[in-house]
Amino acid sequence: MFLHESMKELRVDRRFLCMEPPTLNEIRIKGFRVLVKNLGPADAIRFIQSYTHGSGDYTRERKKWLEKDFDAVMAGIKERRKKKSR
């Protein structure tokens, strides 16, 4: 009886049992349902709209950042602060 009840509560679908990962679209649908349930429709939409895909090549830019040493990074920060305060 305990096993039956726990299986009922888990509501395991066929994909989980077959180890097939959900599609990206299925994940998006489930995620949006969770947002709507917890935030309500209007705030869920506002939450989604607050995110952007951004631009540029993160991997290439990250390599450039990692190549700099700490002192060079600090010098760049200080220089930008000087320019802002003028």
Image: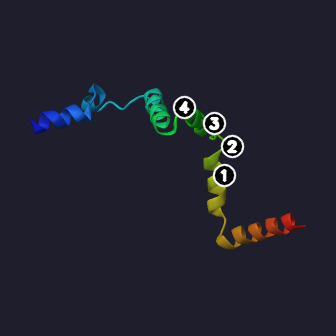
**Mark 2 Cα within 10 Å, few/some/many (few <14, many 20+)?**
few
Q: Where residue 30 sits: x, y (%)? A: 43, 31
Q: CA distance from mark 2 to mark 3?
A: 20 Å
Rendered image: mark on residue 49: 3
Could you tell me which quadrant the C terminus lies in? Answer: bottom right
Q: CA distance from mark 3 to mark 1?
A: 26 Å
Amino acid under disc 3: Gln
Looking at this rendering, what residue extends furthest in the bottom direction?
A: 71
Image marks 4 and 3: residues in contact by CB distance under 8 Å: no
| Element type where label 3 sits in the image | helix
Q: Where residue 41 sits: x, y (%)? A: 54, 31
Amino acid under disc 1: Glu
Tag 4 residue: 41
Looking at this rendering, what residue extends furthest in the right direction?
A: 86
User: In terms of depth relative to the viewer, which is nearer, 75 or 47?
Assistant: 47
Q: Where residue 1 sits: x, y (%)? A: 9, 35
